Image (spheres, grey):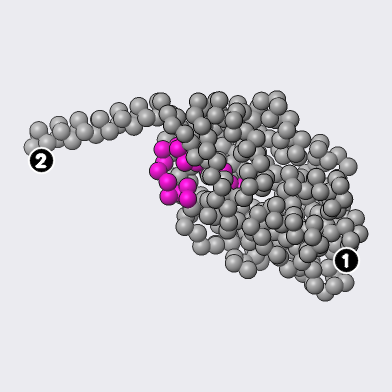
Amino acid sequence: MKRHSLKVIAAFSLALFASAASAQADYPNKPIRLVVAWPPASGIDTVARQIVEALRIELGQPIIIDNRAGAAGAIGAAAVANAPPDGYTILFNSAAMNMLAAMQTPTQYKMPDSFTPIVNVFSSPMVLVADPALNIKSPKDLQDLAKARKGDLFFATSGNGAPSHFVAELFRAQAGIEATPVHTRGSPQAMLEQMAGRVAFHFAITSTALAPAKDGRVTAVAVTSKTRLAAAPNLPTMQEFGFKDFTASYWNGLLGPKGMPKEITERLALAVNRVMARPEIYAKLVGNANEVDTTSSPQKFAALIKDDLAVWTEVVRVAQIKPNE
């Protein structure tokens, strides 16, 4: 190759590098699309709408929420996995991504390889809720009912492979009972099935469980966190009822397409942490029984995703969960 050609290639490469560096330095300079992989009024969607204005102020650009619900978060995840890794299309999803991967469910992406972890926004324990007509006061009552009905019992989930499904299957395996899942498109729909009395129980996210439990539309039986929640101090944990190894609090975080620059992921993580630390936002999220971590980072979130995937892979093995039930 001639020396002149080499100089041209080198100059072109340097120009590309300088252009990319400049784009990263002034990020963001246009609106950001936040793909929420769950339906309106779901737990993640509710939090997204609570923080979006503060995040706009932190980043200096509008944040446009784009709900892409369905397939336990896989539809929204696929939309982001195939987007340019420039930080202008990011995903708000949950540990359901790991749960689908643990089941080896076919998706249009690979978890976690198709994504760039950005920040864990909050973690969610779940609440075991039951039909008030069944007079369930403890997990043992539910266990006895299932055995008496010889498996003729139904529970709601927010989708096959969603956290509510996995936690219910974990309970089913530990309790030694048979029950049939009724899969819906999200947590609000699962709660509608519960309040209508069409299912006996389900493990609901705290943001959708506490209000209907308070007014008696469902019975809150136990929470899956390690300790009682400040937002529901009278609600015992599963461990208090004798399920010693039963704790489940799943992550809800931001991810981008594979290959996002470090400078952009760190910029986004810092902005989110600042927003979550605002007293008015922190109080609101904790009040809804969420567990807020204002110290997450791309590196910490990547490690959390890796460890979490190992946990749910073991749950799949023990509970023998199958995809596309």
| Label number found at residue 198 | none
- Say what amino acid the circle numbered 1 marks: Asp
Q: Nearer the viewer, residue 201 or 169?
A: 201
Cβ–Cβ below 8 Å for labels 1 and 2? no
Between 208 and 179, the residue placed more toward the observer is: 208
Rendered residue at 54%/55% (across/down): 74
Callout 2: SS? loop
Rendered residue at 34%/32% (across/down):
20
Q: Residues within 10 Å of mark 2 (few under 14, many from 20)?
A: few
Could you say where residue 90 lies in the image, as x and y percent from the top left?
50, 41
Badge 2 is on which residue?
A: 1
Q: Residues within 10 Å of mark 1 (few under 14, many from 20)?
A: some
The quarter of the picture where residue 253 lies is: top right
Is residue 160 visible in this depiction of the protein?
A: yes
- The disc, 1 or 2, on the residue closer to the chain's N-terminal end is 2
Residue 307 in the image: above or below residue 270: below
Q: Is residue 294 above or below residue 170?
A: above
The residue depicted at 76 percent of the width and 40 percent of the height is 289
Q: Is residue 109 above or below residue 85?
A: below
Q: Label 1: which residue? A: 144
Residue bounds of the magenta highlight:
79-95
Residue 131 is one of the magenta-drawn residues? no
The quadrant holding residue 45 is top right
Residue 144 horizontal/vertical position (percent): 88, 66
